[in-house]
């Protein structure tokens, strides 16, 4: 293992992986290098080490995995731009530092900091917030998402004590994969950015939400979007570009009415599994649904559900085959053609 002295001698030669000017703190104090860092602590304290950190742009993995740290060291990070996984796995820290204004990448910055109770303000230039606060189980509030963010994949995944969704100021977010998955104390939902295309698992397991947000027109993937949202009372309108509805409303037992399924949908596996209180009629406008297995499993037989499908289509064949096999003998789901 190289010593910190060796790292310091090579910092300028290494630069940053993004070819930005300045020193590179990539992995400098992380779990792998913690022994040499601790041994050299008397020499490389913030007071005399800041001449190296002052111009550092890349802080990727800098303190990653340091589960011995109880607070954030006061190194000068004013020029930091990349904070990917900077504090990931620092399980004993309880508060977050101020994020420097030049930062653009906050992917996994605080991932699995599961004792952290405060969150920082997110700088205006940040683009990547994938997994930023994932597994931060003790945070109760979320920062406003600034206007330049494009990725929010798993940003707040399994933040069990988060009670209110953040304001998303960005209209550029395309990826909302698993954004709030497992936030089982969250009672509100945010406005979803118009650019969003991926909403796979976005609200899975958000058991306290009662209403769904409007789904933007460009969304194509709604797999498991509201799975296990057991207090959701109303299904949102499904946009005309959605292809995947695999497990979308799985176990959403309080939904009583189904809205029409657009012509683009191909996968309806377990879409309404255990939605026991569905009743009335709806149309499946798609001719190409190829998977409908368990779509209405455990539907309450006391309430008739009529499904209108174009005759002679793949969708008709798929659902007819499924309902003949049935998941249980008393589904009371009936195909009608139009």
Image (cartoon, rainbow, N blue to C red):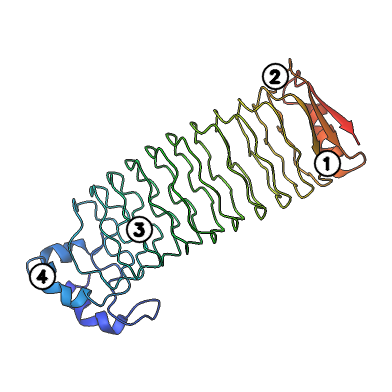
Location of residue 56 by image quarter = bottom left
Q: Residue at x 23, y 64 (%)?
A: 29
Neighbor class of circle 1 (other Cα within 10 Å; few <14, some 14-19, many 20+) is many
**Extreme top residue here?**
302
Label 1 and label 4: CA atoms lie apart by 69 Å
- Measured as percent of width and height from the top left, residue 18 is found at 40, 77
Q: Residue at x 51, y 41 (%)?
A: 189
Which one is earlier in the sequence, the residue at label 4 or at label 3? 4
Would you call the spot at circle 2 few (<14 residues within 10 Å), some (14-19), or many (20 or more)?
some
Would you name the residue on which mark 1 appears? 315
Residue highlighted by disc 3: 109
For the residues labelled 1 and 3, the Cα–Cα distance comes to: 45 Å
Dot label at residue 47: 4
Q: Nearer the observer, disc 1 or disc 4? A: 4
Q: Which mark is residue 300?
A: 2
Q: Could you tell which of marks 1 and 4 lies nearer the N-terminus?
A: 4
Residue plotted at (38% across, 51% down) = 143
């Amino acid at each position: 293992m190289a010593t910190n002295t060796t790292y310091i001698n090579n910092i300028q030669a290494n630069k940053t992986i993004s070819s930005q000017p300045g020193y590179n703190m990539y992995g400098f104090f992380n779990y792998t290098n913690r022994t040499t860092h601790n041994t050299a602590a008397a020499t490389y304290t913030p007071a005399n080490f800041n001449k190296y950190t002052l111009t550092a742009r890349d802080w990727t993995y800098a303190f990653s995995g340091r589960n011995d740290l109880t607070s954030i060291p006061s190194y000068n990070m004013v020029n930091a731009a990349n904070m990917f996984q900077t504090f990931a796995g620092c399980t004993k820290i309880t508060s977050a530092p101020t994020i420097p204004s030049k930062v653009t990448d906050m992917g996994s910055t605080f991932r699995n900091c599961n004792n952290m109770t405060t969150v920082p303000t997110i700088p205006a230039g940040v683009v990547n917030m994938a997994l930023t606060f994932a597994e931060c189980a003790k945070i109760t509030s979320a920062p406003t998402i600034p206007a330049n963010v494009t990725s929010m994949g798993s940003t707040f995944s399994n933040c069990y004590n988060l009670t209110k969704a953040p304001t998303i100021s960005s209209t550029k977010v395309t990826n909302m994969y698993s954004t709030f998955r497992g936030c089982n104390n969250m009672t509100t939902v945010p406005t979803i950015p118009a650019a969003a295309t991926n909403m796979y698992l976005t609200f899975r397991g958000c058991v306290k939400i009662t209403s769904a947000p409007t789904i933007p027109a460009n969304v194509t993937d709604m797999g498991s979007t509201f799975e296990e949202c057991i207090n959701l009372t109303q299904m949102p309108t499904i946009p005309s570009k959605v292809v995947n509805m695999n497990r979308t409303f799985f176990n959403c037992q309080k939904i009583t009415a189904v809205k029409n399924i657009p012509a683009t949908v191909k996968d309806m596996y377990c879409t309404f599994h255990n939605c026991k209180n569905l009743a009335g009629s709806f149309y499946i406008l798609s001719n190409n649904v190829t998977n409908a297995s368990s779509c209405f499993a455990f539907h309450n037989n006391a309430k008739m559900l009529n499904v209108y499908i174009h005759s002679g289509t793949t969708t008709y064949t798929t659902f007819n085959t499924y309902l003949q096999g049935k998941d249980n003998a008393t589904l009371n789901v009936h195909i009608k053609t139009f």
